[in-house]
Amino acid sequence: MYDILITGGMIPDFTTKTFVKANVAVKDGKIEAVLPEDGFVEAARVIDASGKVVSPGFIDMHSHEEVFPDGSTEFDVSKYYLRQGITTGICGNCGIEFNPVSYVKKVYETNGGGYINYVPLAGYNSFRDEYGFGWYGDVPADVRAEIIEKLRAELEDGAWGFSFGLEYCPGISTEEMTDAVMALKEYDPLISIHFRADTDKCLDSVHEIADLSKVTGCRVELSHIGSLAAVGGNMRPSLDIMNEEMSANPRLGFDVYPYNAFCTEIGSAAFDMDWRAKWNCGYDIIMPLCEPYMGMRCDEALYNKILKEQPEANVVAFALDEADVRLAIADPNGFYGTDGGMFPGMGSHPRTAGSFPRILGKYVREEKLLPLIDALEKLTIRPAAFVGLPTKGDIRPGMDADITIFDPDTILDGATFLDTSLPNVGIDYVIVAGKVGCDHNELTGELGGELILRN
């Protein structure tokens, strides 16, 4: 007796770049068998997937994990990830680690699992901030050594690597970053980097990230390339640089989210310059995500008021060129990410809830930027290989039963900048470790996700 039998679906075959009609049998959290379409076995639950794609669960290469304030163990953001077909997320990006690995481990144990799998990274900026050197301060050698030991402790607890947010903390020099990676190279860490600068310094920033992987030999991921290169007309040359570097170095990668607006705190270093002149725009590209200004467009007075009174408020900046974002989505290399996150008392960018249905609906089906099989490859088997998750990213016997079943003719995002709770369309089931966690947008309460620790 199997736990689940999925019948009649179209399974992506990444070797032949085709879809194969077959049945999938699941038992004890694993894909036990892939049967011919007329093959049938006894199962406790049969799911009819006729006309649907039975895909490996989507892997989010750039996410932000739960914020657990005041000892909370309540999941929030991962519910939104699950509803859009994500079963595994790489979290702790942009140099920001909201909770130590030990605490996240406790949360998963307390709840008996999670909505999705988390692959945790430690945040370099978070540790650096503890010492009070500010965004631009130079950290002396003895303090750097202490930060490295804090990172080492997180790696020993199971973090897969660590991340840097260079734009948010320009004082992190290339030397400081490289020394930290080299000091911990024995762990073969996965390194995620939020770029240093856009516009006229964009290409230098791309080279800096590519060179780090080349010099250290570590896996290095350039975070959300749209936020870096879709300002100032730098996307095409940035992609050219990355593709050339990646052709010689399989340990280098990049990700993109499918929106022409980024989101960050209004008081962050991203705005700590004459950003209007740099981006050739006005205050009206800024949309606050805080009350009572939610959804308004700024003028100079409102911008300065929020900056003074609520410097930690999240804002959306419509500064990215849509054509450049499309270039990155269509690129045959790279991965996809959400850059999603939920923060208590603040609104959220729709990328948290709708990124992957948007890619498959708007950019694959409607705009035909790339074939569906290629998009799914970038969402599943390729990020699994890059991160080092050998039992994820494919539909075949022995793999983890992380599965997303969707209708390729209807899948589309629902979330907007004013309401991230609007449901996506066309995602029937999301299964994590053999448990149906989401059934037609409804959460079932079955928690199959785990905190995936290094080694």
Image (cartoon, grey):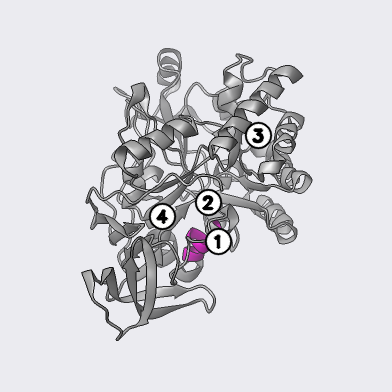
In this view, the residue in front, 357 or 261, is: 357
Q: Which mark is residue 196?
A: 3
- Tag nearer the camera, 3 or 1: 1
Nearer-N-terminus badge (2/4): 2
Is the residue under label 4 in contact with that under label 1 (CB below 8 Å)? no
Amino acid type at circle 2 is Val
Is the residue under label 4 in contact with that under label 2 (CB below 8 Å)? no
Amino acid type at circle 1 is Arg
At 54% from the left and 57% from the top, the residue drawn is 383
Dot 4 falls on a residue whose secondary structure is: helix
Residue placed under numbered mark 1 in the picture: 382
- Tag nearer the camera, 1 or 4: 1
Q: Which residues are magenta?
A: 375-383
Nearer-N-terminus badge (3/1): 3
Q: Residue furthest bottom?
A: 38
| Residue 198 lies in quadrant | top right
